[in-house]
Structure formats: structure tokens, C-alpha cells
Amino acid sequence: MENLSEIYELKKQVIQARLKEFRELPEDKYLDELLFCTLTPQSQAKKCWDAVIELNKIKNKNKHNVADVLKSRTRFHNNKARYILYNIESWKKIQEQLSNPDIIELRNWLAENVQGFGLKESGHFLRNIGKSNNRIAILDRHILRNLKNFNVIESDEIRNKKHYAEMEDKFIEFSNKIGIPVDELDLLFWSNENGDIFK
């Protein structure tokens, strides 16, 4: 635990600067983050971001040209191409929900209404547009692995939505206990495993 705190002090400024960038993200970039989070499940984050950049170059998107961009960059490219097209069509409806100040309610709505999203991806999206406010957790593999290593949880497998909420509470409680905000702790765990602070 002391080692984690020491590493946090070394990376704190960089982590906080990254989170500030998320909070200051222009609203016209929100859709890019939504598409990015649609692509990330079981795929490499940087390749997914590269895919978003390439997708933005296509004026008339269809399942064929979107899947063509995705096939070398993400897993399940055909399914994700379908999700991407649906989410672009639904963007106005999604956008209208983003003013909801109840972050838990908003996260849960996104999980139910955005194609390819669950609780984890919804939390990831909200963090990347600066709206998570240390209220929700992105229970990705790296988070769960670290929580298990610190004996916060017994298993790194999430069984269902109720179990996700229980694990999230434990993560937030752990974050409060060690004095590192949830959003910062997420990026700290990520950087410890991947060597950088991405998104």
C-alpha cells in the first residue's frame, strides 16, 4: 500500500492533468469518445482510437466501409460496425441525456441504450468526457486484477449487474480509504500496467 502511495505521488500531476483534459473536452468531441468506448471491449485502446480517427475520414458510413476500418484494429469487427452505425444514428438522443446531473442514473441509462455498452463502457465514456466525478468505477480487467491483488475483492469475475454495483462500492471504499480519488486511481492502475496514461 505504501508503494502504491509513493507511485501515486510520482504520477499525481500527470494523472490530474489528464483528467483535466477530459473535463475540458469540447462537446463536439463527445461522439468520438462514445465510438472509442464502443470499440474497446476486448481490444487494444490505442488501436481503437486509431480506428475512430479513420472512421472520421469516411463521409458516408455503411456496414462495409466501417467493418473494413475495424477488422485490423478491433475484435468482433462486424458486430462493432453495427454498433457504431446505430450509435451514430442515435447520437442526438444520447446527447440529450448527458445533461442529467445524476451520474449513476445517467451511467445506467447509457448501459441500457447505447449499443455495445454495459456498465463498464458507460463509465469509461463518462470518465473520458469528464463527467464521472469520482462517483462511478470502470471495472475493467486491470482494475479488477489490482483490486484482487490488494485483497479488496476475492474474485476478479463479475457475475451480473448487482455484483458490478457491489464491486464498484468496494472500489470506491478502497479509494476513500487510501486517499486517492477513484478516477485518479483508475489511471494510476492503468499506467502501472501499461507504462503510460491514455484514456
Image (cartoon, rainbow, N blue to C red):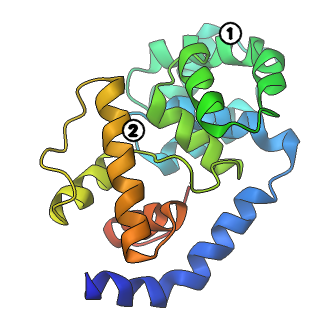
Q: Which residue is mark 2?
A: 43
Indicate the position of residue 105 as horizontal and vertical percent values: 62, 29
Badge 1 amino acid: Asn
The residue where tag 1 is placed is 62
| x then y, percent, for residue 86 | 66, 10
Q: Is residue 25 left or right of residue 86?
A: right
Quarter of the image holding residue 189? bottom left
Quadrant of the drawing holding the C terminus: bottom right
Mark found first going from the N terminus, 2 or 1: 2
Nearest the eye: 162 or 49: 162
Residue 25 drawn above or below residue 83: below
Q: CA distance from mark 2 to mark 1?
A: 21 Å
Which structural element holds mark 1?
Answer: loop
Residue 23 vertical placement versus 70 (above, below): below
Relative image position of residue 153 (x, y in whole percent): 19, 51
Q: Secondary structure at mark 2?
A: loop
Viewed as shown, does residue 118 lie left or right of 85?
Answer: left
In the picture shown, does residue 102 fall above or below 188? above
